[in-house]
Every structure is written in structure tokens, then in C-alpha cells.
Image: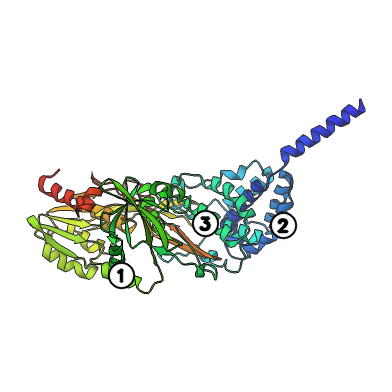
Amino acid sequence: MKKVALLFLFVFSQTIFSFNKITETERLAATCKVWGFLKYYHPKVAGGELNWDNQLLEKLPLIEKAQTKEEFSLILENWIDDLGPVKEIALIAVPKDVKFFDKNFDLSWFNNKLFSKKLSKKLKFIEENRFQSNEEFGPNFDGFKNEKNYFNLECTDKNSKLLMLYAYWNVVEYYFPYKYIMDQKWDQTLNEILPSVVQSKTSEDFYKILRKAVVKLDDSHVVFHIYPTSSTLKKSFYYFPATGKIMEEKLVITEILGDSLAEADNIKIGTVITKINDKSIKEIIEEKRELIPASNEVSYLDKVIGMILMSESDKVQVEFLKDGKYETKSMTWFNYHDSHRNEYKKGAQKKKDKFKLLDNNIGYVNMGVIKPKNVPDMIEALKSTKAIVFDMRNYPNGTYKDISDFLNPEEKKFVIYTYPYLNYPGRYYWTEGRSTGFENKDYYKGKVVVLLNEDSISQSEWTAMCFQTAGNTTIIGSQTAGADGNVFEFDFKGFHTGFSGIGVYYPDGRETQRVGIVPDIEIKPTILGIQQGKDEVLERALLYIENGK
């Protein structure tokens, strides 16, 4: 009977131990959240009194040894206690003029199943008695000044890699305004990449894992540049002598970058590419998805072209489609560092008009070329036209104010923002936004047409919102890149990254991120149109101006 009882107790104890056992990923993910929370919330840590990075590096070996939930919680509890007492303060009042935007805010993880009740209470107490910043969010805000000191860490050291990952993950967690519309929950991304980060052996492996994480932000503003090393500097990249657009799962050439090089292989505007090195354009598009951050599909397809037309070898097999027949050529692509390349590119570029008068008394403005100093001349030349087409399939030069003042009869609000609320990290608040125009009897009376496409990003989208305040504005084209607002940027050992820093919305609260600026009339170029040398989007705009449809 005693043997049966002992066996029962042994099995029971093992069951309890297994129930309380904690995996490495669970342990490291929870530590990431606690470390980041304390970094921004604990008065002493957020106030800069401690070297918080070093504290993490010192605690990680202890955390790694924790086998059960109880052991893990106790380590975190003791860590918090060692920071010293947090002064209990009166209820922190929110200013009456602050209206919160809380779609990003979630501290429900305090009640993580891994945490003891005591630990959860400590975290809640710190939230309620959190650090209060005297800094105001504005143009000179540098909330990431403490993120720029990760240059001495080794990407082959496990704990150093975790520190860099934790720092990046928590910056996004608390300061990325569009976290709530990412396709994948940011928590899930952390859990997915942690095992790979731990197992990575080289800097290159580590950076590849981080790149996959930044892609999950679904933000066309996201950048991820790996700094050159002695080994990467030795690499050469070769490029197709033209660029283009993805259409019908093919790549259609829309611009020649090297006249003589393109001519040698009979590459022209409208040339259709179907395969590169025996891979279809569709296959290449799919295999690059983990490498390119983008807010939406049109932006992704625009960005992926650079990778499709780049090779590590100068000998490339390219399949073309012409007159219904497929032809494969063995091409020589050119080196990016070739001193002649810039000359080829300069030779291919044609001087573009800042503005001009088209037939039927219609004005045309190239927003990617015109500068503020040119606006008065543009207004004088086009003020008597029946319509003006503002081509914004490019990146404007800060001309929004002068032009929108000309278009509007009165002052109108065109945008509102969400800013991070620095006294409650993770929360955002609505701002008054921006207005344009003034009481202007001499405003433009004709039709206003704005042309947009996937090349329209950030300032292009923001400027389009501004021009929409003129009651006679029509947007023609296709979905834009869907990345609006400024960009937060910061550096780590070996790489540079950044993302959209403030939330940008229409005055009625409609989103622009990922959605882009929705055209009133949708029109996209066709392969045939490009081959015939047509600008089908501009043609559609001129048709609308003439018949109102």
C-alpha cells in the first residue's frame, strides 16, 4: 500500500512540476515585456538613474536558469524590489483637452499566466505611479535617444542579441502608432522570432531574423539597412539597365536607365519580362515577401522590382514576351559601382516641365519637380485655365501650402494626428491637426485633378489630403502606398531602421495608413498603353475634365 501511495505522490509531484514548467520562449518573451515596461514606466528607470541595458544583461543568466513559473516570477519580483520603492502618488489626472486614441494600448499581459499575483500587483502599482515626463512631443522630440547606443554589442552573443531585440520590440510596442492594424499581432511576432534569435550563429543570420520582424509592421515607411562589413563590401551587384512596373504578374519596362546598355539588348519602353533565371516573375514576387516591408500590395509590388532587377552575377537569363512569343536571352547586367552607370542614367533622364499649358486651356503641374520658388509663376500662368492637373505620382517638394492657399476660398482643416502620450507610454492622443487656405476671393475657380498611384507615398498622400479641401478636387489614378506621417529612425549594431512615427487621419477620423488615398476615379496603366507610349491616367483625367465623367 505504501508503494502505491509513494508512486501516486511521485506521479502527482511530476505532474505539478510539468504544469509549472516554463519554456525558454515563454520566459524570454515575458522578460522582454517586463523589461520594456519598466524602461518606460518605472520612475528610476525611465528617469535615467540606472543603466537599464546592463541590468538586463546581468539578469538574463538568472532568468535562463528559472525552470518553473514560481522561480521566474520570484526573479522578476526581486529585480523590481532591488530598484527601490516607487513613491505612491495621487491619481494622475489627464488634462481635460486630451482625447485618447487607445487602439494600440494594452497592458492586459500583467495578468500573464506565468506571473504570480504578487508580480502582477507590482506591475499594476508601477503603472498607476508611473514616471511623468516633462518632455513634450513635437518636431524636436527624440524619444529614441537612448536607443542609439547599441554599437558595442556582439551579434554572436546570445544576451546581446536579446538586448537589441528587446529594445527594438519595445520601441514598436510603445511608439508605433499603427500597431493596431498590423496583419499579425506584435506579441506573436516576438514569440515566433525568439527561438531563431537564440539559435542564430552569425551576424548575418541575426539580421535576417530581424528583417523578418520589421516586415511584420506592414508599413511602407519602414527601412532596414544593414551596414556594410568587410565581407559584404567585396560583393558586387549587377542591374538590369531599366526599371518598370508589375502588371498581370509580368514586369513591364517603363523607364530606361542606361540608353546604350538597353539598346544593346533591344530593351525598350513596354518590353515585357516573364522570367529571370528560370523563375517566373510571380515566383520571385512570392519568395521576397519576408524581405520587403510594405503597407499594402501595390506598395509591395512597387518595392520588389528593385530586387527582381538586381543580381549577384553579371550573367543573367531573362525571358521576354513579344508578340505572343517567349524568347530567352543571356544578358550581361552592369555593376552598380561602374563609373559609367551614373552617366548612363543621366543620359536617360529627360528634363521635365515644372508646369505647362495643355490643349483646351488645361494646366499641368509636375509636383515632383516644382519647388516653392516656382509656385508664383505657376499660379500666374495657370490661374485662368478651366482645370489644373496636379501630377503627384512622385514625391512633392514642400509646395502644399502655397498651392492649397491658391486652391481654397477659405481656411479648412485637412488632417488630424495621433501623437504618443509621453506620460502614459503606449497611449496616443488626438491633436488639432493642420489647416490650409485663408479667406481668398481670388481662389482658383476651375476644376482641380490630382493624379496618384503606388509611387505616391507620405508627403504625396498628405499633400493630396490638403488639396482635397478645395471642393472641386477629384482624385484620379490608383491606390497609393499607404504610409503617411513622419519617420522615427534609430541605429543598432550593424543596422539602421525606422517606421512611421505619428498617426495621420482625415478630420473625420478616416484612416490613411495602409488604405492610402482612395481615388474618385480608378484607372491603371495597361501593358498595351505603355507599349503605345500613352499616359492612360493623364488621358483619363483629361476626359473627365471635358465631360465631367
* Label 1 crowd (10 A; few <14 / some 14-19 / many >=20): some
Left or right of 143: which side holds 321?
left
Question: Measured along the vertical axis of the image, is residue 53 above or below residue 113?
Answer: below
Front disc: 3 or 2:
2
Residue ID at (88%, 31%): 6
- Amino acid identity at mark 2: Pro
Foreground pick, 176 / 302: 302
Element assignment for label 2: helix
Q: Which residue is situated farthest in the right direction here?
A: 2
Which of the two discs, 3 and 1, labels the residue nearer the N terminus? 3
Question: Quarter of the image containing the N terminus?
Answer: top right
Q: CA distance from mark 3 to mark 2?
A: 24 Å
What residue would you read off at disc 1? 344
Which circle's residue, 1 or 2, is located before the other in the chain? 2
- Residue in the image at 54% along x and 65% along y: 494
* Closer to the camera in the image, 313 or 214: 313
Q: Can you tell which mark lies on residue 172?
A: none
What residue is rendered at 54% in x and 56% in y?
A: 208
Quadrant position of residue 303: bottom left
**Residue 187 to residue 439: above or below:** above
Check disc 2 and report the residue beneath it: 61
Q: Give the residue type that dot 1 points to.
A: Tyr
Q: Amino acid at mark 3?
A: Val
